[in-house]
Amino acid sequence: MNVVEVKNIKKKFGTNEIINDISFTVKKGETLVIIGPSGSGKSTILRCINNLEKIDSGNIIINGKKLIKEYKKDKPIYNNKDILKQINLETGMVFQNFNLFPHLTVKENIEEALKYVLKKNKNEIENISNNVLTKLGLTHKKDSYPCNLSGGQMQRVGIARCLALNPKLICMDEPTSSLDPELVGEVLDVIKKLAEEKKTMIIVTHEIKFAEEIADKILFMADGKIIEQGPPNNVIKNPQEIRTKQFLKRYTV
């Protein structure tokens, strides 16, 4: 079963085409990792899937629900608010800059959406937040504010907040890019465990060795296009396209 179907999407900012006719699918329990040079459109794809950016053409289907209902005069008409809300609730996003509420504690950051978006009762909220705090090794930091956390801890809170909503799809945009090198490992370990648990994920990263370890499928992008895709053994170990080889050379030499 496909959790995500991206069909021939295009995205422009002004006259600058960021995504040019991109298509791919992600099956339930699969981890897709998107790699490529900066400016290739990787993060924009995630933002389009999460409806943080609007596409100009094509469609994105998540759990059978279409973002675009129809086209009128070549202009996309997005689906009604109820369907978009369902899609948003089923799609979680972990940002590279954490995006935590600075005035809320760790526990409050995790519980905010449970309380005001999912309208869970007090006992449910307590159980869910305690479970994810334990899972992410954050129980001892539950009453701390983001300003008192390390970068690795903040990103783990971001992942915990996402998991608390139990999304069917988790998108991660460069989850380690804002971290000091010594803090990268703790976040990558968490993501590896999620992959082992067969969470459906799309991850944008520059961590090529990590991508090779956890991905079911690698998608290499450059200049807004998919240059090559397939299993890690093919794309990373034995790339066929010159552009892919050039990009990976710095990592594999």
Image: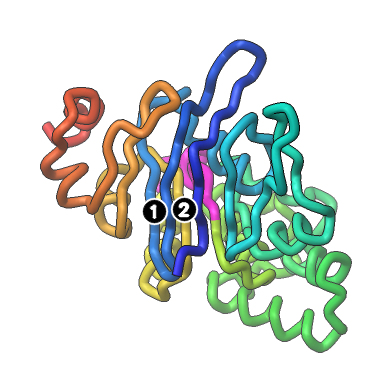
Q: Are marks 1 and 2 in contact (CB under 8 Å)?
A: yes
Q: Classify residue 125 by image quadrant.
A: bottom right
In the structure shown, which secondary structural element does the residue marked by tag 2 occupy? strand
The residue drawn where x is 49% and y is 29% is 41
Horizontally, residue 42 falls left or right of residue 46, namely: left
Residue at which label 1 appears:
32
Q: Quadrant of the C terminus?
A: top left
**Which quadrant would residue 127 be assigned to in this image?**
bottom right
* Image x and y of residue 49, in percent: 60, 47
**Looking at the image, which residue is at 21% across and 32% down?**
248
Residue 70 percent coordinates (x, y):
71, 43
Q: Is residue 170 left or right of residue 71?
A: left
- What's the residue at 47%, 59% (across, down)? 201
Q: Nearer the viewer, residue 17 or 64?
A: 64
Instruction: Say if residue 167 shows up in the picture.
Output: yes
Residue 202 disc label: 2
Name which residue type carries label 1.
Leu
Q: Secondary structure at mark 1?
A: strand
Q: Which residues are magenta?
A: 171-182
